[in-house]
Image (tube, helix red, strand yellow):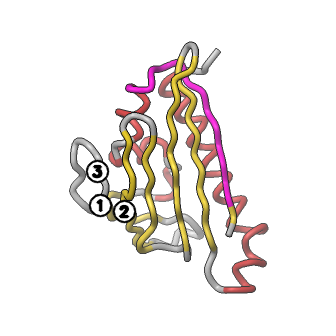
Amino acid sequence: MYTLERTQRLPISVEEAWKFFQSPENLAAITPDYMGFNILSETPDEMYPGLFIHYKVSPLLGIKMHWTTEITHVEAPTYFVDDQRVGPYNIWHHEHHFKAIEGGVEMLDRVNYKVPFGILGKIAHPIIVRPKLEEIFNYRFQKTEELFGKWK
């Protein structure tokens, strides 16, 4: 099992951050264009535990795949968790945490994941999988700053 963490501070309130990040529709705005991110299911105005979201995305080599996540925990506006039910990982557990700080919000993304294909997956992880995940999360960091500004 591997873990990826990213912390970001933004000059907006917890409520503003929550409103943006709890909406699956906004994920496209902070996902690299080459991934062809497309939501296939209806999305409600507010997420809730048990919500399934179906996507089509091309995370690697332009290969399109279906990805289904379930929102398993919601504690507005402090955190929510999505778990992959169908997709490229054996395990994908993504926690989104929001905390008020002076002058804004601190957000923590924590992803615990397990790659498939046994020893081949372990070999591919440091060469392909981890660098690709870091690229995607770095892109999200940058796009989020473009949308909301830099925290000072």
Residue for badge 1: 50
Q: Does the CB distance between marks 2 and 3 fall below 8 Å? A: no
Quarter of the picture holding the C terminus: top right
Task: For marks 1 and 2, give the CA distance.
Answer: 6 Å
Residue type at mark 2 is Glu
Magenta stretch, residue numbers = 3-15
Q: Position of residue 79 (x, y in %)?
A: 45, 42
Q: Position of residue 42 (x, y in %)?
A: 21, 56
Q: Position of residue 4 (x, y in %)?
A: 67, 54
Residue for badge 3: 48
Instruction: Tell me, for residue 70, which label it has, or none.
Output: 2
Within 10 Å of disc 2 (Cα), the crowding (few <14, some 14-19, many 20+) is some
Within 10 Å of disc 3 (Cα), the crowding (few <14, some 14-19, many 20+) is some
Taking 31 as reference, is 78 above or below it? above
Residue type at mark 3 is Tyr
Q: Secondary structure at mark 1?
A: loop
Quarter occupied by residue 65: bottom left
